[in-house]
Image (cartoon, grey):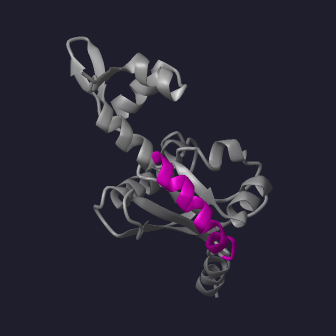
Amino acid sequence: MQRDLLSVEEVAEYLGVNPVTVYRWCREGRLPCVRIGKFWRVRQQALDVFLQDSERPAVLSERLRPVLAVLPAHVAVVDKTGTIIAVNEAWKAFAEANGGNLRKVGEGVNYLEVCDSATGAQSDGAATFAEGLRSVLSDGREEFTLEYPCHSPSERRWFVGRVRRFPASGTPLAMVAHESVTDRKLLEERLENQ
């Protein structure tokens, strides 16, 4: 008889990851688990679905690259957990030009965690943006938009961030785009001061 329930250690060994990672996936709800006494178990079928969902974004990100490449806004595509599966060149260039590390804001990074851990003067905007992204990923809304300041030490800047559900079958995805609206904001300021 084939076993339907696998231990966390068996899942970790099969996937080649640390058991702590599997426990985290269970706590986050990314991998459906069952608690029996003090032990966590994973159904074989749940593991199969988890693996299929993990494969789809990788394939899709390759298909998206030509589309993302021509967009002038800083664009990332995130999966249902908020993990970035693809970014365009404008996203990478902005990160590099502003001292960002792509290992912290690029593919494979959880965008929601980046927003949630933001500190400083503009962290309230990051928290609001994370809430908007979550609402789109959970089918609460089709899109979310937020205009926010993003000043650097050398210049005053404003952006509009947009999140839109990506019409894809299977795994929920969202496109996150940040576009500069600095010229408009500066013009508005000049007009107000006249």
| Horizontal side of residue 52 vs 42, given as left or right | right
Question: x and y percent of residue 143 in the render?
Answer: 39, 69
Does residue 52 appear left or right of residue 106 in this picture? left
Residue in the image at 75% along x and 63% along y: 155
Quadrant of residue 158 within the rendered picture = bottom right
What residue appears at the point 72 percent right and 64 percent down from the top-left corner? 89
Residue 39 picture location, percent across and down:
28, 14
Q: Based on the displayed image, in which of its 4 quarters is residue 1 positioned?
A: top left
Q: Tell me if 42 is positioned left or right of 105 in this view.
A: left
Image position of 13 with respect to 177: above or below: above
Count of labels shown? 0
Left or right? Give the position of 75 relative to 25: right
Look at the image and say whether residue 59 sits in the magenta stretch. yes
Q: Position of residue 49 (x, y in %)?
A: 36, 44
Question: Residue 4, can we see it?
Answer: yes
Q: Which of 187 and 64 is in front in this view?
A: 64
Is residue 31 something that shows in the picture? no
Q: Nearer the viewer, residue 97 or 41?
A: 41
Could you tell me residue 147's position as x and y percent? 51, 68
Q: Which quadrant: the C terminus?
A: bottom right
Q: Which of 81 and 47 is in front in this view?
A: 47
Residue range in magenta is: 54-70
Q: Is residue 66 above or below residue 34?
A: below
**At x 72% / y 54%, what residue is drawn?**
95
